């Protein structure tokens, strides 16, 4: 369902017209925070070639790392759906939480108590200053939808997630679902 109001926990789907932008072309972003001062989100459908073990060798796991966005790409962020296990988490919405105690998180991953359906790691995030996201909305850069997956989105989203979302929108968007990423190569 397309929405007109920005609320944290929603999904921002890149309009098909965003071409040539490596970060945002065919992106789906989970809006993690939104208020009068600005917005923060994480691109949830762009895995990188790294695993958590590549970046943090004392974590014995092959959990993928995702490109969260172009801001602070030298910092690691995570979202999860197990606030009862990870202290100091901040609720985004729908049972999705941001951050928390990293030492506890490492122990939980190493002991197998949380897995790819519970947690997702990102290098960087997507950020907008005051009114910037609203301006991009007015320029038709993003489609706002509800997160119907709730906290299951952590295990659901994949590289094909943008296409799936565009197909769900239907109508005029259907033609874009099978278009090449760069239409000039068609």
Image (tube, rainbow, N blue to C red):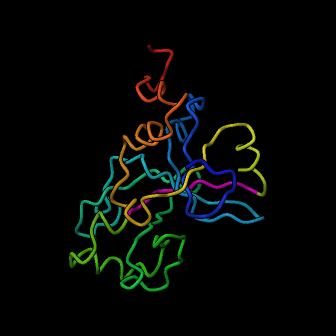
Residue at image location 60% in from the left, 43% down from the top: 143
Could you say where residue 124 lies in the image, as x and y percent from the top left?
52, 56
Residue at image location 45% in from the left, 73% down from the top: 95
Could you say where residue 122 lies in the image, as x and y percent from the top left?
44, 58
Inspect the magenta stretch and tell me whether residue 126 lies in it: yes
In front: 29, or 121? 29
In the rendered structure, which segment of residues is drawn in magenta?
120-129
Q: What secondary structure prevails in the magenta region? A: strand
In front: 59, or 67? 67
Which quadrant of the figure has residue 162? top left
> As drawn, is 29 to the left or to the right of 106?
right
- Quadrant that contains the C terminus: top left
Inspect the magenta stretch and tell me whether residue 142 lies in it: no
Residue at image location 50% in from the left, 62% down from the top: 75
Q: Is residue 183 above or below residue 72?
A: above
> As drawn, is 4 to the left or to the right of 145?
right
Could you say where residue 182 lies in the image, as x and y percent from the top left?
48, 22
Residue at image location 38% in from the left, 48% down from the top: 47
In front: 104, or 133? 133
Which quadrant of the figure has residue 120? bottom left
> As drawn, is 106 to the left or to the right of 139?
left
Could you say where residue 84 lies in the image, as x and y percent from the top left?
39, 85
> As drawn, is 96 to the left or to the right of 54?
right
């Amino acid at each position: 369902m397309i929405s007109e109001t920005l609320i944290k926990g929603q999904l921002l789907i890149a309009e098909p017209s965003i071409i040539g932008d490596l970060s945002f072309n065919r992106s789906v972003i989970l809006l993690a925070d939104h208020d009068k001062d600005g917005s923060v989100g994480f691109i949830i459908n762009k895995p990188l070639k790294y695993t958590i073990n590549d970046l943090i060798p004392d974590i014995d796991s092959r959990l993928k790392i995702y490109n969260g966005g172009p801001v602070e790409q030298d910092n690691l962020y995570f979202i999860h759906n197990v606030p009862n296990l990870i202290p100091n988490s901040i609720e985004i919405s729908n049972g999705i939480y941001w951050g928390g105690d990293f030492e506890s998180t490492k122990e939980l991953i190493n002991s197998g108590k949380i897995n790819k359906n519970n947690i997702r790691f990102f290098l960087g995030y997507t950020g907008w200053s005051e009114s910037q996201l609203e301006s991009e909305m007015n320029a038709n850069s993003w489609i706002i939808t509800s997160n119907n997956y709730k906290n299951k989105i952590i295990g659901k989203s994949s590289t094909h997630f943008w296409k799936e979302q565009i197909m769900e929108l239907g109508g005029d968007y259907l033609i874009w679902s099978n278009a090449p990423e760069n239409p000039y190569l068609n």
